[in-house]
Amino acid sequence: MSNVFDVLNERGYIKQLTHEDEIKEALSKEKVTFYIGFDPTADSLHVGHFIAMMFMAHMQRHGHRPIALIGGGTAMIGDPSGRTDMRQMLTQEKIAHNVACIKKQMEKFIDFTDDKAILVNNGDWLLDLNYVEFIRDIGSQFSVNRMLSAECFKSRMENGGLSFLEFNYMLMQAYDFLVLNQKYNCTMELGGDDQWSNMIAGVDLIRKKERKSAFAMTCTLLTNSEGNKMGKTAKGALWLDPEKTSPYEFYQYWRNLPDADVARPLALLTFLPMEEVNRLSALEGAAINEAKKVLAYEVTKIVHGEEEAKKAEAAAAALFSGAGDMTNVPTVEITQDKLGTGVVDLLCELGLLKTKSEGRRLVQQNGLSINDEKITDFAMVITKDIFGDEDSVLVKQGKKKYTRIILK
């Protein structure tokens, strides 16, 4: 088999790793069982998880076996990594709901048939642990001084303190790796670069307890050209659940990226050959729009399927040209009793504006239009005449947000 290490390295995935030479040799000579953990803190994965799923998918495509670990147990505590405050405590019922939702999403990216991949929940072994036995057996392997030097703990200590509850998280994640090593001969943990300290802890625990080789490799975080995390929208996170972020909104996010931010997601979030990634990334000026269209289509196809990607592409083309099939443009319906409502009040009621003051600012800045007519009076009311014969209008907010409103 070809060495997936070279593929991951060329595409820009690999950030940090332990035992580089041993990892390269293992990935070139054997079928490696590896795992990535996902804590179910919400009922959907978001684009930050997507890069980890792609990391996993590339490994599987090169013959290695993934274990997707859902943290039904660790989510009871909450990972302090990258946090300045303590995470919200979740109930077991809420965690169980989130686990069920995330399982369905993972099957879009990873092939679980015929034992090609394994899906596990660490709640199966963490929730019934005997704490005294755990601390004697596992806690005795950890140096508090070394733990406090970890970046995930240092930042919390500097920003208001670290609870003892969260201090246990590193031990639990390390124990996950040990359990997977014992049950499935899992020898490698992959994850985001913010997990580096926790991952090293697992490697060290296996090497101490089992006297066996274990490795860790982190993936670069998905950031823009300014070093900030990508995937934030006006509504919050860019979710993979179509009920939370529609396929059209998802497509438009990638279609509207700044020119300087196109190259990284082309390499990290698509399966396009690197020759094509490099060609598209080198485009300049107006030609870079070709790269953005390809990126938006390819990423939406992976997450939501080819049919939804084509619909989103058609909707974007129709809006850009001002003609064509508007069926796939984001649409809301209103009833006749809404006629006579102020335009800003209606958009707030429909969730298209967060506040009335936001609407007023949009009107004052000439950023709101209906059927290409600028709205200059925020007290304007919605009438039947505005909808015309087709009983629909196209609302534009700012430069790129479109919504079709249908009168029923």
Image (cartoon, grey):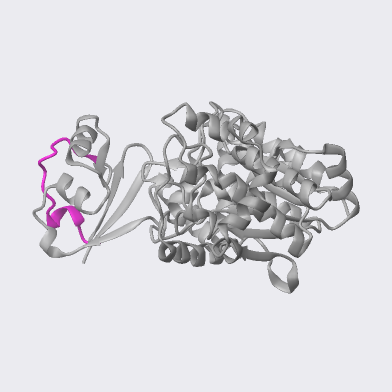
Q: Quadrant of residue 366?
A: top left
Callout count: 0
Residue at 64% over, 38% down: 197
Residue 132 lies left or right of residue 19; in this view the side is: left
Do we see residue 85 in this rendering? yes
The dominant secondary structure in magenta is: loop
Q: Quadrant of residue 66?
A: bottom right
Residue at 77% over, 45% down: 215
Question: Which quarter of the rendered picture does the C terminus lie within?
Answer: bottom left
Q: Position of residue 91 (x, y in %)?
A: 40, 60
Q: Position of residue 246 (x, y in %)?
A: 43, 56
Q: Position of residue 17 (x, y in %)?
A: 75, 38
Above or below, 155 against 23 in this view is: above
Camera-side residue: 395 or 222?
Answer: 222
Residue at 66% over, 37% down: 143
Q: Position of residue 312 (x, y in %)?
A: 48, 55
Question: Which quarter of the rendered picture does the N terminus lie within?
Answer: bottom right
Residue 9 magenta: no
Above or below, 392 against 222 in this view is: below
Residue 262 lies left or right of residue 240; in this view the side is: right
Do we see residue 314 in this rendering? no
Camera-side residue: 284 or 50?
Answer: 50
Magenta span of residues: 373-390
Residue at 87% over, 42% down: 22
Name the residue furthest bottom: 114
Residue 136 lies left or right of residue 161; in this view the side is: right
